[in-house]
Image (cartoon, rainbow, N blue to C red):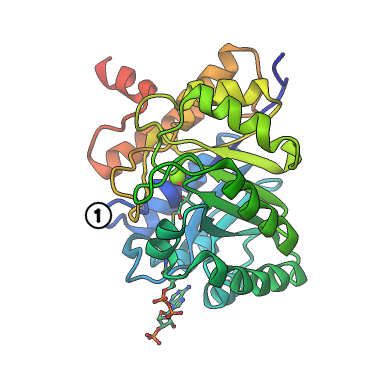
Amino acid sequence: TFPEFVTVKEVGPRDGLQNEKQQVATQDKINWINMLSKSGLSSVEVSSFVHPKWIPQLKDAKDVVTKIYRKPGTTYATLVPNAKGLKAALETDIDEVAVFMSASESHNMKNINKSIEQSYPIFKEVVQEAKDHGKRVRGYVSTVFGCPYEGAVAPHQVLKVSQRLLDIGVDELSLGDTIGVANPKQVDQFLSTIKNDLDVNQIAMHFHNTYGMALANVLVSLQHGLTIFDSSLGGLGGCPYAKGASGNLATDDLVHMLHQMGIQTGIEEEKLNQAAEYIQKILGKELPSHHMQIANRM
Ligand code: HMG
Ligand code: MG
């Protein structure tokens, strides 16, 4: 059986844009995010308070957060890697912050310049302070199904990292197939394993579509009772510290599949598609989602 309603969390303005070399103007980002809000999405990750040297595209995080239209009922989120990032985030009235780490040691080091063990005390402080300020906190776990540097990642390693993040106080986990190597059987076995120890209502799945298996992996996750999925409009994105990571699961394709299956999302496809066309035009290149490939041929 399938759920009646699925929550789709848009990460395009952060995960989608962070890898784009060509700087997108702040006002264009704001226009795009406003279109995303109006499509009915209930959660939009809008930027990152990270070091601008590491992610130059998102150096205007504060401007973006303070100038977007805030649709009532919609949760706006940003990444924060440490206390300095949180401090900047708290100067805005962002609803949610997200800490992020990897299930594999080498990717964690490449991405945030810390070992996994060194990351916990930093996050503990960040999460505590964020909660003291009434923020919702998300914890990303990357390289859940494979690491670009280490190869296979064991489910028990993901479980260990996830449980530490929950102990620290994150409200929700987002489990990421950062390089898009997961296959449906692997997802099935993984979810069967972790369901014994984690509450599926606290887990979002974050798939990438490198080998075209993201929607198949969503299907398996739905069958396991998961109802929260991250995606990026048009299939934009990839991690700059994960070589070979291609686009995220495309929001337009995900929402289309869910609606075709009779599963509600609260999102208006037509408005979502207009937002995809907008950002495609801004970036000046064809977006990889199936929906945009079809739209571009018409
Ligand atoms: P570091 O160099 O180790 O930081 O970087 P540090 O604490 O040693 O400080 C060095 C300098 O950076 C200092 O400045 C700090 O003030 C400054 P200086 O004294 O030299 O002038 N600094 C900062 N500046 C702005 N914002 C901050 C900040 N922190 C320190 N927050 C750091 C450590 C974490 C900052 C760096 O490694 C970084 O910014 N990393 C971010 C990388 C990133 O954003 N990667 C992409 C995320 S995507 C992902 O992880 C996967 C995900 O999408 C899920 C999936 O797809 O699977 C979530
Ligand atoms: Mg991603």
Q: Is residue 125 above or below residue 145?
A: below
x then y, percent, for residue 155: 58, 41
Can residue 218 be seen?
yes
Can residue 31 be seen?
no
Q: Of residues 152 and 162, which is closer to you in this image?
A: 152
- Residue 229 appears in which quarter of the rendering? top right
Q: Of residues 159 and 26, which is closer to you in this image?
A: 159
Q: Is residue 6 above or below residue 1?
A: below
Q: Give the secondary structure at mark 1.
A: loop
Kind of residue at badge 1: Lys
x then y, percent, for residue 225: 71, 26
Q: Is residue 220 above or below residue 74?
A: above
Q: Which residue is mark 1?
A: 21
Q: Of residues 234 and 145, which is closer to you in this image?
A: 145
- Residue 192 appears in which quarter of the rendering? top right
Q: Of residues 157 and 5, which is closer to you in this image?
A: 157
> Looking at the image, which residue is at 51% across and 40% down?
36
Quadrant where the N terminus sits is top right
x then y, percent, for residue 51: 40, 71
Q: Is residue 264 above or below residue 146?
A: above
x then y, percent, for residue 49: 48, 67
> Looking at the image, which residue is at 29% across and 43% down?
244
Ligand 2 placement by image quarter: top left
